[in-house]
Amino acid sequence: MNAGTEIYQDDILHLVRPEVRALAAYAVADATGLIKLDAMENPYGWPEELRTAWLAEIQDAALNRYPDPTASALTARLRERINLIASHGILLGNGSDELIQLLMLATDGAVVAPEPTFAMYRLIAAYTGRRYIGVPLAADFALDATALCQTIARERPALVFLAYPNNPTGNLFDAEALRAVLETSSGVVVVDEAYLPFAEVSVQDWLTRYPHLVILRTLSKLGLAGLRLGYLIARGELINAFDKVRLPYNINILTQKTAAFALQHHGFLLEQAAAIRVERARLVTALSARNDFKVYPSRANFILFRASPGRGPVLFAALKQAGVLIKNLHGAHPALSDCLRVTVGTPEENAAFLRYL
Ligand SMILES: *Cc1c(COP(=O)(O)O)cnc(C)c1O
């Protein structure tokens, strides 16, 4: 009986594609009881009056009905907020992660990204069976436009992903280098603006010039990570094509209502982002004052810094022991040895981080 069960399970496992079996699942650290500075979340809550108004807004949500499949009210509000030109459309995703997956499902051919970058590009490419080519960034994490364009010219990728600013390095790639990539690519170039509220620059103006430019954004880093709402901007024809591989009802009714409400009252979120930018400058100054760290410039809501050789993982563990969770990037990529990434928190959280450090 037992032996039979084992054979049965073995057979089932062999049905799992080898590229899926080979994957390490995306790991999320347990932050229970810790000051959480590991995941680029906004540390602030909502003002009391807004919370009350929001609860009133969602209290009559028809949970028994399927949500609007195209989330038309939310899409219209978003469109208006970002001043989108008429030729282009918006596709909503259950987080921008889902939109990255959707892009991989809808297209065929190689996928290229500079590295180190956002881990999901490689992970989703792997499980959707795509050939993925990572092109190393320069030593200071700038885009190596020459190497990237050579790879693009050789591989003719269907998708190129550029996080702008880049995660986990925090820097904004040079705009001219970005243009060079767009001029070289015949496939879709995805510029991932997840950190727009902290970078305050966008390539949205380039949409009319480059028909193959797709912009990805998310409300997660702005302060709504729990909602799971990302959006993709592209030419109308591309939106219609991509929309065919979107699961119906991927944006639930509570997310639709809440995001529309938040966008209507988004002043407080923008103020929180501004406070985070101020704290970011303070943190950079404090970290830079220590001569045992190399601190990288950041246009995002996190800071990458490198400890002296062998010290990165030790510091990470000691901080965690003291009650502060940041992200240990040592081992994630050869260029990130002894690197740690700290999300900008409240002034109190940042002070605790610096004190224990
Ligand atoms: C956090 C992050 C995302 C994912 O955002 P979600 O909308 O929460 O899925 C996408 N791209 C980059 C570069 C990120 O850092």
Image: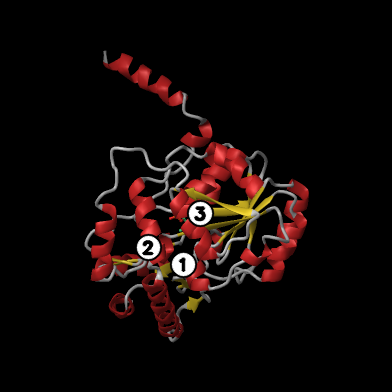
Which quarter of the figure has residue 287?
Answer: bottom left
Give above or below for 268 relative to 52.
Answer: below
> Where the N terminus falls, by quadrant?
top left
Instruction: Judge whether 14 appears above or below 96 on screen.
Output: above
Rendered-image quadrant of the C terminus: bottom left
Q: Secondary structure at mark 2?
A: helix
What is the spatial separation of the Cα atoms under label 1 and label 2, in whole angstroms?
Answer: 38 Å
**In this figure, which residue is indicated by the disc labeled 2?**
262
Q: Amino acid at mark 2?
A: Ala
Can you tell which mark lies on residue 176?
none
- The secondary structure type at the circle numbered 1 is loop
Q: Ligand 1 within 8 A of label 2's CB?
A: no
Earlier-in-chain disc, 3 versus 2: 3
Give me the C-alpha separation between circle 3 and circle 2.
15 Å
What crowding class fits label 3: few (fewer than 14 Cα within 10 Å), some (14-19), or many (20 or more)?
many
* Disc 3 versus disc 1: nearer the observer: 3
* Residue on which disc 3 sits: 231
Residue 248 against residue 210 in the figure, above or below: above
